[in-house]
Image: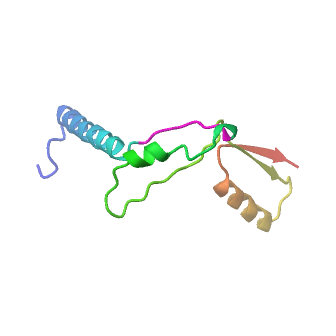
Amino acid sequence: SPRGDVSPAGLRRARARWLRALRSRLRARESMLGERRLVLDEDDIHEDPFVQERARMKLAAGEIPTMTYTEPGLTITTIEVPAMGEVKVWHNFLHQLQVASGIVVLRGL
């Protein structure tokens, strides 16, 4: 058949091959990126805490290391919703839903 083995056993084998390949790619990506998490307290920083990390980075041409700051805990967004809204109000409501992050709480007015 042009679609390959579509029997249940054939699908299980194809899925297993796909998962093995995906896991292999993820392991390779993790080893290339070498992502590390460091928890720092601003009061304890007197010099650049990433000097040793930067020295160990192996970057290909054109790659740029990034550093992100993540606050611990979950984010929450509260959106106030009017009971009797006009059409223009609902456009704003939809926009707020699109840019909301974390848990969304709808508060009726």
- Residue at (63, 43) in percent of width and height: 46
- Across and down, in percent, residue 50 comes to 50, 45
The answer to whether residue 40 is above or below residue 63 is above
Q: Residue furthest right?
A: 109
- Direction from residue 67 to residue 54 in the image, left or right: left
Q: Nearer the viewer, residue 63 or 98?
A: 63
Magenta span contains residue 103: no
Q: Residue furthest front?
A: 46
- Direction from residue 7 to residue 40 in the image, left or right: right
Colour convention of the picture: rainbow
Q: Residue furthest left?
A: 1
- Residue at (38, 42) in percent of width and height: 34
- Across and down, in percent, residue 108 comes to 84, 47
Magenta span contains residue 38: yes
- Residue at (65, 48) in percent of width and height: 101
Q: Nearer the viewer, residue 78 or 13?
A: 78
Prevailing secondary structure of the magenta residues: loop
Q: Quadrant of residue 45?
A: top right
- Residue at (31, 58) in percent of width and height: 60
* The residue stretch that appears in magenta: 35-42
